[in-house]
Image (cartoon, rainbow, N blue to C red):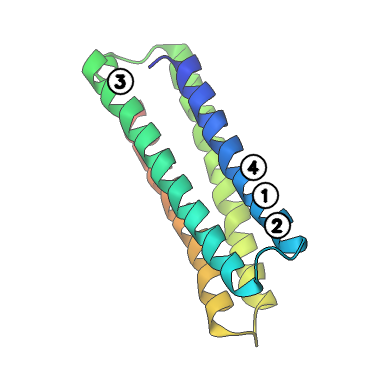
Amino acid sequence: MTDAGFRKRFYWTAASIGAAEMAVVFAFIRGLIPPRFLGWILIGIAFAGFIAFYRLLNRARTERRASGEFDKPLDEATRRRYRSIIRRQKIWVALLTFWLIYVLWATRGSNLASRIIGPSVLILLIIYLIWLIRRLQQRLE
């Protein structure tokens, strides 16, 4: 899969998930979906989106490995791009950490589910970004 094909599939997947979530919220606002099922439906859409993105990224990774692209030495332009990506990822980690602190502060005194689910998603995102940074740094070495 080419980079353009990957981006196209990635954006279509993201747009499809967003459209599905907007349709469910619109149906909820119109009274077609009871409040009890809204959360379950949105969790189902998020889970399906996670699976779709996982399969998309896994396919792209296996195709790149098969092409031998990971074995080639990096040129200077790619090194600059990787350093730029690492810098941006570090900024995102810092912002998400502050957001995590705010979420924990803002949800104090609320029910346990909202205090666990929101921060756990942020923590998973931070862990993923740190893993990505370390992987890119290893690739630069």
Alpha-carbon distance for marks 2 and 3?
41 Å
Question: Amino acid under label 4?
Answer: Ala
- Residue 138 located left or right of residue 24: left
Residue denoted by label 3: 64
In this view, the mark in front (2 or 3)? 2
Quarter-of-image position of residue 53 = top left
Alpha-carbon distance for marks 2 and 4?
12 Å
Mark 2 element type: helix
Label 2 or label 4, whichever comes before in sequence order: 4
Mark 1 burial class by Cα count in 10 Å: few <14, some 14-19, many 20+: few
Q: Nearer the viewer, residue 1 or 132?
A: 1
Residue denoted by label 4: 19
**Looking at the picture, does residue 136 appear above or below residue 104?**
above
Tags 1 and 4 touching, CB below 8 Å: yes
Label 2 or label 3, whichever comes before in sequence order: 2
Mark 1 element type: helix
Label 3 or label 4, whichever comes before in sequence order: 4
Question: Amino acid under label 1?
Answer: Ala
Q: Position of residue 37 (x, y in %)?
A: 57, 69
Residue denoted by label 2: 27
Alpha-carbon distance for marks 3 and 1?
36 Å
Q: Position of residue 103 (x, y in %)?
A: 64, 70
Tags 2 and 3 touching, CB below 8 Å: no
Mark 2 burial class by Cα count in 10 Å: few <14, some 14-19, many 20+: some
Quarter-of-image position of residue 112 = bottom right
- Residue 31 - label: none
